[in-house]
Amino acid sequence: MDDRMRFSVSTASPSGMLATHVTATGSLRSDEPHAMGGTESAPNPIEVLLAAWTGCLVASARLAAMERGLTLGELRVKAEAELDPRSVGGDREAPAGLLAARAELSIEARLSDPDVLKEEIERRCPVSQTLRRTDMPLELTLKTGV
C-alpha cells in the first residue's frame, strides 16, 4: 500500500502577462514586482514560497505541541529571503535561486526547553526539509514568551 500524500496545482498565465492564477485546493494569484515587468497585483512567487514555508512551520509547531500537551497561544512568523535579480534577468554569471532565507517564529507561550520544540518543528516541516536539500542557508529562530 502506498502511504504517500500527493499534491497538485495548475497554473495559467494570460497571454503577455507575468501574473498567474494558481488553482489548488483553493486558488491564489501571483505577480512580479514592477522592476521585473509585473504589476505587483499579487504576491510574487518568492513571497508565495515564503508563505508556504511559514504556513508549514506553524502547522508543524501546532502538531508537535499538541502531541506534547503544550498550549502555544498565538504564533507569528516573519520570513525573508535574498535573491540576486540579475539571474532572473538572464545574467549567467549571477547566482541563480535564493541565496538565503530566514524565519523567526514567535510563540506566545513560555517553554521550558524551546530548542527541543524548534528541532521538532524543523524536522517535521516538509517545506523546511525541501529547502534544506538545496544547500541554501536556511535559518529558523524561535522566540518564546512574546
Image (tube, rainbow, N blue to C red):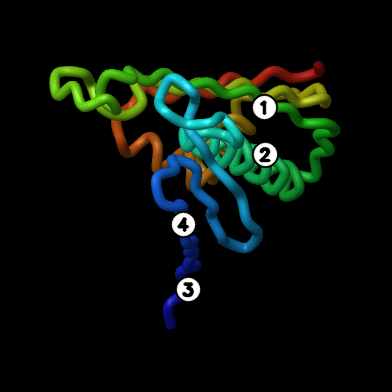
Which residue in the protein does label 3 denote? 3
Which residue in the protein does label 4 denote? 12
Q: Please say if the residues under marks 4 and 3 sit with CB atoms less than 8 Å apart.
A: no
- Point out the tag, 4 or 2, that comes first from the N-terminus: 4
Residue in view at x 64 percent, y 23 percent: 78
Write down the quadrant of residue 105 in the picture.
Answer: top right
Whole-angstrom CA distance, mark 1 to mark 4, is 29 Å
Task: Where is residue 59? Give x, y as percent.
Answer: 67, 45
Amino acid of disc 4: Ala
Residue in view at x 56 percent, y 29 percent: 40
Whole-angstrom CA distance, mark 3 to mark 1, is 30 Å
Residue in view at x 41 percent, y 18 percent: 82
- Callout 2 secondary element: helix
| Tag shown at residue 58 | 2
Which residue in the protein does label 1 denote? 77
Task: Where is residue 79? Give x, y as percent.
Answer: 57, 24
